[in-house]
Each structure stands twice: as structure tokens, then as C-alpha cells.
Amino acid sequence: MGAEVSTNSDSRVADAAPSNWVDRWAPVSWRPYLRLGRFDRPIGAWLLLFPCWWSQTLAQVASREPFPDFRAIVLFAIGAFAMRASGCAYNDYVDRFIDAKVQRTASRPIPSGQVTPAAALKFVVVMALVGLAVLLQFNWFTVWLGIGSLLIVAVYPFAKRVTSYPQVVLGLAFNWGALVGWAAEKGSLDWPAVALYAGCVLWTVGYDTIYAHQDKEDDALLGLGSTALHFGENTVSYVGAFYGLSVILWLTAGALAGAHLVFFLSVTLVFLQMSWQVATLDIDDPANCLRRFKSNRDVGVAVLLGLTADMSLSWFAGLS
């Protein structure tokens, strides 16, 4: 793939942090592909990973295990970053002509000429194969469940061309790990995983609506749909509703799995953080929107710590 990188291979992407590790430390020849896979902007990979970890840990809470399965944690981390990279490269390939017309995305590797479309497709395949190698470490039910997400993933880049709700399609694809994590531990699906998945879908619709406000003017000019445009000035109310429903569904998932007080307290703290996002959101300030979007990593960490603490403390206390 290296031979298909242009002479602009050291060009930075506009929406990446100036101090990101790719632009500072990665070999110059690797940078276009690391940017293509969003390794310079890893927040999306974290948001993809947390539902996997939550689901895996929730299943272990239901099984009354004392500690998270470290092997599964590592596998999900590798798989999430690989599949995030593959999905972003595929999305950028499909959107390459649109991205070239949007100021925030014109500096991305394909429209800026850092990576050719053909090389981007090779990168998609390589990263997908890494994800497949990870998936094959689990039981066959999980393998087929994971493969089942590919149809939604393939459709997602086209959603904004035909609907005002592409964030819903993203949520359905992006949170499949909330089902896969449970299946990896249990070999089947059950209602706690379904409730967790539904809550994660609504969470994604909320935070990606915030994110989409950065591009609403360009999307409108290009005739693309988004919940940011659809909700408009009512965005704060809608995002608040999505976040509130997601918290209710996460609490329901915990109750169905037999979680204890520590988990419910952690979700309560998460609700306060999400309330801060909504209360301080300024949809006309891109920097404000980006900060609140990125703060959802704190949501992921808090829920994971709550589940882990619930698991361990309950086991040591002899709770059943």
C-alpha cells in the first residue's frame, strides 16, 4: 500500500488534535493510513469499544464472576480499533467526493490525495481481516452474530443520502458489540443484552446528533440528511430525551442481569454527566459540540467501572 501514497503524505487532517501521536511520532509513510483509520482521532474507536466491554462485563455480572475476562477485554479492544479503522476507510471511500466539498473533511487522506481510493479499499480489507481474526476466537454463535452486522455497516454511508436519520443507522451498526459481548460470554442472547443494545443505540443518536451540528451548513448545501438538521433548534430537547431513555434502558439491563447498587450509582453519575452535556450544549458553536461529543468517553469509563466494581464487590460480599 505504501507505493500508493502521494507526496502529501505528511499533511495533517483538519479535525485532528495538533498534538496527536500519529502526526508527532508515527513513521511518515504510515501516517496517511493511520489517519484514514482515525488512529489520530481515537474517540470513535472508544465509543465503539465500550458497548462491547459493557456487554461482556454485564454477562459476567449475571454469571456472578469476580473479575472481568481479561482475554476478552484485549480481544475486543483489538477488534474494535481494527473494525473502526476499516469502517472509517470504507465510509471515506464512499464519501470521497462529498468530503472534498466540506471544509472540515477536505483534508482527509482520500480527498486530499494522501491515499488513493484503491489503496483505501485494500486498507479496508486488511483491517476487516484483523477484525475477523479476533471474532474467530469466540464461539460460533458470536462469530455469526458479528458477521450479521456487516449489512448495516455497508448501508450506513449511504443513509444520509436518503434519510434525515442516518444517526439511527449508525447507532444500529456502531453498538452491535452490546450484543456480541454478551454472546461471547454466554453463547446466546438474552433480554439484558437487548436492553443494553437499545440504550446504546439511543445514546449514539444523541451524541452523534451533537457531532453532526459541526457540519450542518455543509450538509444542507449538499442536500444530505442528518438529525442535526432535522431537529434544528429543538436539538437540546431531543438529545435530552435520547440520553434519558438510554439511561433507563441501561438501568433495566442491569436489573435484568441482577446487578447491584454500585452499578446503579454509576449510571446515576453518568446521567448527571449527560445532563451537563445537554444543559451546556451550544449547537452553533462547533468547538462546544466537539467537546461534548468527546466527553462521552467519560460515560463509557464510568459505566465500565461501575460494572467491574459491582462484579468484584458483590462476589467478595457473597451476594447472589
Image (cartoon, rainbow, N blue to C red):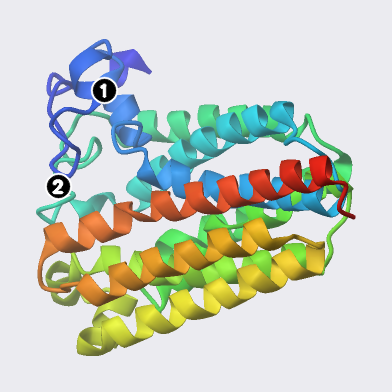
Residue 20 falls in image quadrant:
top left
Front one among 6 and 232: 232
Do tag 2 and tag 1 residues touch (Cβ < 8 Å)?
Answer: no
Vertically, is 40 above or below 278?
A: above
State the SS at label 2.
loop
Could you tell me how far apart the alpha carbons at marks 2 and 1 are, in whole angstroms? 19 Å
Q: Residues within 10 Å of mark 1 (few under 14, many from 20)?
A: many
Q: Point out the image quarter for the C terminus.
A: bottom right
Residue 144 in the image: state x and y as whole percent. 80, 48
Q: Residues within 10 Å of mark 2 (few under 14, many from 20)?
A: some
Residue at position x 53%, y 80% from top? 245
Vertically, is 30 above or below 50?
A: above
Residue 274 in the image: state x and y as whole percent. 38, 68
Apparent side of residue 33 relative to residue 258 in the rendered image (left or right)? left
Residue at position x 83%, y 54% from top? 62
Q: Point out the image quarter for the N terminus.
A: top left
Apparent side of residue 196 relative to residue 162 in the rendered image (left or right)? right
Q: Mark 2 points at which residue?
A: 106
Q: Mark 1 points at which residue?
A: 22
The amino acid type found where label 1 is placed reads Val
Residue 97 in the image: state x and y as whole percent. 23, 53
The amino acid type found where label 2 is placed reads Ala
Residue 142 in the image: state x and y as whole percent. 80, 46
